[in-house]
Amino acid sequence: MPRIELIDNLIQLAVTLLCCVGSGCLYLSRRKQEYFLLCCFYGCFSLGLLYWTLFLLLFRETPKFFYVSETVWISSFIFLQLVQYTFAREDERAFRCKALHLVPLVNLILLVQYCVMDDVFSSLLCCSAMTIISWYSLRGLCFWRGRRETGARQRRLFHGCVLFYVAMEYCLWTASLFWQGDSLANPYFWFDFVLTATLLALLPIAERAVGK
Amino acid sequence: MTYIENVFVCLAAPLAVAALCLGRRHLRLFLFIFAGMAACLLSAYINTFLTALYRADDLHAVTEITPVVEELMKFFPLLFYLLVFEPEQDSIRLAILTVAAGFATFENICYLIENGAEDLVFLLVRGFGTGAMHIVCGAIIGSGLVYVWHRAWLKIAGTCALLGAAITFHAIYNLLVAYGGALVYLAYILPVLTLLLGAVWLRLLSFMSGHCRS
């Protein structure tokens, strides 16, 4: 029985479910679209994880043939993109800078690596979603850099948190390609624990940025 | 070997005659039932093809490939209906539930042909379990689409998420059934329980919204 992986998944499942309920309660009390979308993001993420964890718990292996969890995880990425889009101001959406050219370049390199070493279709879907998310968050970071308006710091923090989430996802996927067994020495688990912490931190950070 | 296309023709023939007799008013309902049964037939072919392509064993085929293929095949007739006819909210729910019912009926008939019909109690439990599971998956998509299809910003993400939720629910059900033992009974209860919880939740929501308005 892969114990560390199971514990890791169960912790992440508990955290995402907690955040889903938290953002759902925030939506019911404040009626803001961002909270509804965040609730959907966490809900989809936890649903995919529930299937993944159940599979691991019952059959002591992870799903390897087809895209069950991937369908809801891709949906969760789309919801995160919608959060970012809803969150951005009109002038922020139109903002462009040279640093943004880095986003497709880095994502393309990683995509090629995943296509060579892993499944092409799911890599294509996940990397496309991550490219859009990282584009939005880097654009937000560049736009709000040096601004002294109310809420600028909170928005920078939100975009930074999302960018860090993307980086952790990439680290996780890369580490999964070089699987080192079910032990804490495996970097996969370090990244996954940090990813769980990032997911937990995202809700209060988003709550501060959206405001009342 | 089961000749499911022959079963399909045999089941569709009396329904087609009934549809012709009842006229245009009820034609839509029959078309959705045909669509559900045809989706089940095509799912069987695609499942077999993908299982051979990935060289998957029975367990992986049932828990990983089947849920994705079946839910997608059930969704395609509805997607066509939504895109071409742009129906009212009530029609969306009716369409997906009828497609799901047609799918579940055809699947049950194929199961009976393959496994016999001696044990009535087991068939009753299985019938309600699997039948209700397809209806729950239909209800997830149907009730969700009523909400998301009229909000342009949520259309794509919402549709993907609903489809993903239905696929995952279906996969979890198949996972529990494939594991066997006491979990099979949990799997059979799960869809009915979800339907009941969903009904209670909807009542509660409508009560709360009525209470807020008053």
Image: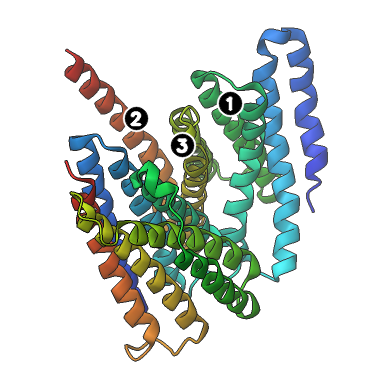
Q: Chain of mark 3?
A: B
Secondary structure under badge 3? helix
Where is the N terminus of chain B found, in terms of image quarters? bottom right
| Label 1 vs 2, first from the N-terminus | 1
Secondary structure under badge 1? helix
Where is the C terminus of chain B found, in terms of image quarters? top left
In this rendering, the answer to whether B133 lies above or below A78 is above
The residue under label 2 is B199
Give the quadrant of residue A146: bottom left
- For the point 18% across and 45% down, which residue is it? A211
- Mark 2 in CB contact with mark 3 (< 8 angstroms): no
Tell me how far mark 1 sits from mark 2, CA to CA: 19 Å
Q: Chain of mark 1?
A: B
Give the quadrant of residue A97: bottom left
Residue nearest the observer in this picture, B140 or A118: A118
Give how far across and how far down residue A84 sits, in percent.
Answer: 38, 50
> Is any part of residue B7 visible from this angle?
yes
Image depth: mark 3 or mark 1 in front: 3
For residue B153, which numbered disc appears in the image? 3
Query: Hey, what amino acid is under mark 1?
Result: Ala
The residue under label 1 is B95
Q: Crowding at label 3, few (<14), some or many (≥20) Cα neighbours within 10 Å?
A: few
Q: Chain of mark 2?
A: B
- Mark 1 in CB contact with mark 2 (< 8 angstroms): no
In this rendering, the answer to whether A40 lies above or below A188 is above
Query: Hey, what amino acid is under mark 2?
Result: Ala
